[in-house]
Amino acid sequence: HAEALVLIREIYAGFLATYGISDERTITSGLTLAGTLWYQKHREEARLLVRDTLLPAARRSLGSDDDVTLKLDQLSANILRLTDRPTRDDLLEAETIMQDVVQRRRRVFGPTH
């Protein structure tokens, strides 16, 4: 798993250097990196990457209703609720984010989503 993380970091860095943070390919590879970081217990790094870099870029470049942006929002909510010791505020924020994601998905993709 450690080797995979190295490769995923390299791919993200390559997209970032080539296309910039606003490109969908960069944001998508960043989403993959954040998920891998979370899975491999690099929780704080994943949280900061999503919150400070990927979500702002996705909202600005792709829009709030884009599928990649919605996946980042969902990951953000999961990061909040699945930390080792989530606070009540963390859980409430995660619930608010997920309710918003569900509403946007239904509006954009239809009621079956």
Image (cartoon, rainbow, N blue to C red):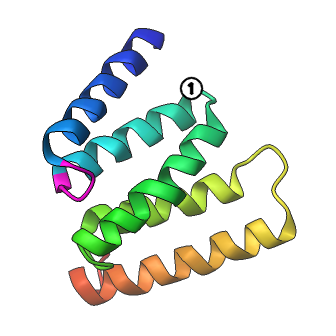
Foreground of the two, 94 or 33 = 33
Q: Residues within 10 Å of mark 1 (few under 14, many from 20)?
A: few
The magenta-colored residue range is 20-24
110 sits to left or right of 40: left
Residue 22 falls within the magenta-colored stretch: yes
Location of residue 52 in the rendering, given as x and y in whole percent from the top left corner: 51, 58
Q: Residue at x 44, y 55 (%)?
A: 53
Q: Residue at x 50, y 48 (%)?
A: 49
Q: Main secondary structure of the magenta part?
A: loop
Location of residue 7 in the rendering, given as x and y in whole percent from the top left corner: 31, 18
Q: Amino acid at mark 1?
A: Gln
90 sits to left or right of 87: left
**Does 112 sit above or below residue 83?**
below
**Does 48 sit above or below residue 14?**
below
Residue 58 sits in quarter: bottom left
25 sits to left or right of 65: left
Q: Residue at x 21, y 49 (%)?
A: 20
**Does 35 sit above or below residue 14?**
below
**Does 23 sit above or below residue 93?**
above
Can the viewer see residue 110 in this picture? Answer: no
Residue 32 falls within the magenta-colored stretch: no
**Residue indicated by mark 1:** 40
Location of residue 112 in the rendering, given as x and y in whole percent from the top left corner: 29, 79
Q: Furthest residue to the left?
A: 18
Foreground of the two, 39 or 34 = 34
Q: Quadrant of the C terminus?
A: bottom left
